[in-house]
Image (cartoon, rainbow, N blue to C red):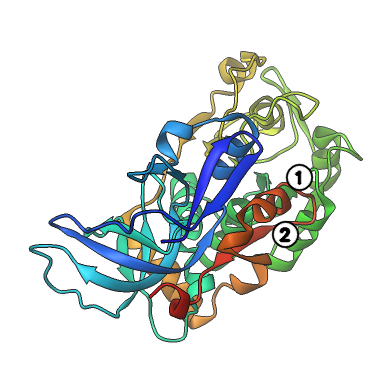
Amino acid sequence: MLSANYIDPGRIEARSDATRPKPAPGEVLVAVEACGICGSDLHMYRNNSYRHSLVRKTPEGYDVPGHEFAGRIAELGEGVEGWSVGEAVVGVTGYGGGMAQFVTVPVNPFQLVRIPEGVSFAEAATTEPMADGLQMVRKAEIKPGENVMVFGVGIIGLGVIQAIRAKCPDVGRVIAVDVQDVRLEAAKGVGASDTINPRNADIFEAAVALCGAEDDYRGKSAKIDVVIDCAGYIPHIPGPPPLEIALRCLVNRGGRIVCFGAYEEPMTIDFSYVIKKEPVIIGSNGYAAEELVEALDMMRTGKVDRVGLISHTYALDEISAAFEKQGQPEAVKVMLEIPQDTAA
């Protein structure tokens, strides 16, 4: 079986001698057609962050990443009912394995869902990050007229903006913040009303210019009601961590911050804003099972365009080049494709 093998930061290879897995009771074996490189995979590739939860070992000792993928059921494990060989499915695994010709997936609504007619394998492989975005928007409880700021507009942040536009039609401004202009252009394409590149402007001052300011005994604010942080903390990016900037921009009463982005290292921030402004800070990790189905239905009905977010496509045996590309400024979503005839 062809599979990826993550070795060390900056080193990943394709192997052709991996053992094809067998589904355990309650699992199916999926022949993978498409698998996306997630932001968490990229964190791991940079400095081993979250490695323990992002790879699955083969009997040969290969570490196979990949947790957001689509394909067809190739085999049913013992006791599996209601599923058939040949069905097109989205799989989500907690411990990698999807960057291979075959991967086993437990049969439960959080990890296995059918792909509706008209949705391609490549776009279906973006279901998990879209569902993540739907959960973040649900948790944010965005009210009509509220201004929202989204930090980090890779595939996750772009999905957040798509979810906002689909579910919160009366939202105020939707401001995308990222250090890459290509991603900011993509954010405009999916519904951001405004963009800020912190390399070119102070985020707080730019937000004030867009939304106005308030200044009272609680401090200053840029009248941002909700911040959804898909960036987390990456030490090599200069300036205060996004969470600190979010707290500064947030309204002085009733503000909410949803935290999703990964933290590569511990960080130091000015936490006094939390005392002064009394915001609600909410963590978000994953999705509700029904949000996987909702994400696919949004693709089927054309409410969201996920194909347009796939900026580059590579074959599985080009895995090293694919990871290098995902780390480049021009990349939004890099997709690995494995045609079914080569996965037989």
**Amino acid on which the number 2 mark rests in the picture:** Ala
Q: Quadrant of residue 279?
A: top right
Residue that carries the numbered disc 1 in the rendered image: 178
- Residue 270 versus residue 253: which sits nearer the camera? 270
Residue at horizontal 74%, vertical 62%? 186
The C terminus lies in which quarter of the figure?
A: bottom left
Residue at horizontal 48%, vertical 82%? 301
Label 1 with label 2: CB-CB less than 8 Å = yes
- Within 10 Å of disc 2 (Cα), the crowding (few <14, some 14-19, many 20+) is many
Q: Is residue 190 above or below residue 210?
A: below
On the image, the x and y values in percent for residue 226 come to 60, 42
Q: Is residue 337 above or below residue 153?
A: below
On the image, the x and y values in percent for residue 302 come to 54, 80
Q: Is residue 11 left or right of residue 34?
A: right
- Within 10 Å of disc 1 (Cα), the crowding (few <14, some 14-19, many 20+) is many
Q: Is residue 263 above or below residue 101?
A: above
Q: Residue furthest front?
A: 17
Residue that carries the numbered disc 2 in the rendered image: 187
* Distance from Cα at disc 1 to Cα at disc 2: 10 Å
